Amino acid sequence: KNAMAKMATGLMQTMTHKGDEGPTERYCFLNNAGKNQAIGYVKNQVKTSKYTWWNFVPKSLFEQFRRVFNIYYLFVVIISFIPGVSPVAPAVNLVPLIFILGFGIARELYEDVKRALADNSFNNS
């Protein structure tokens, strides 16, 4: 086939590097993801989001406790549950920790959703 016939059928030919067996040809079907997947080509998608629905909680808690401030507050909360050591009720220390962790996790969720939407917009353009 000549180049014009290949363009008309949506077929593009590219040459790859010279290997041990000589030059090889590769055919890509333009705007036809089904044929490209049937050949075994991988999808060309961008993914910058960090989380999935099943790993959000463990990963976000890990990210929150990477901050020294949150580890310190967790340590204070644990100590406040020991009777006779803390002069205040454990809830006094627990509520600020939950608030700080909840706010940080909500912020990460918001940013990750925005990244996922931007990825989806870019991949479908």
Image (cartoon, helix red, strand yellow):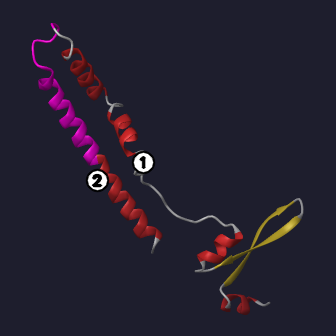
In the picture as drawn, the residue positioned furthest to the right comes out as: 21
* Amino acid type of the residue tagged 1 in the rendering: Trp
Disc 1 element = loop
The percent coordinates of residue 13 (x first, y second) are 73, 78
Nearest the viewer among 6 and 80 is: 80
- Residue 4 is left or right of residue 69, and the answer is right
Name the residue at 66% across, 67% down.
41
Q: Which residue is mark 2?
A: 110
Residue 104 magenta-highlighted = yes
- Residue 118 is left or right of residue 34, and the answer is left
The percent coordinates of residue 62 (x first, y second) are 38, 35
Q: Which residue is mark 1?
A: 54
Residue 79 figure quarter: top left
Rounded to the nearest whole Å, what is the CA distance between mark 2 and mark 1? 16 Å
Whether residue 115 is situated above or below residue 61 in the rendered picture: below
Disc 2 element = helix
Residue 83 magenta-highlighted = no
Name the residue at 62% across, 80% down.
30
Q: Which residues are magenta?
A: 84-107
Q: Quadrant of the N terminus?
A: bottom right
Residue 99, which numbered label?
A: none
The percent coordinates of residue 34 (x first, y second) are 61, 76
Name the residue at 42% across, 63% down.
119
* Amino acid type of the residue tagged 2 in the rendering: Tyr
Callout 2 touching callout 1 (CB < 8 Å): no
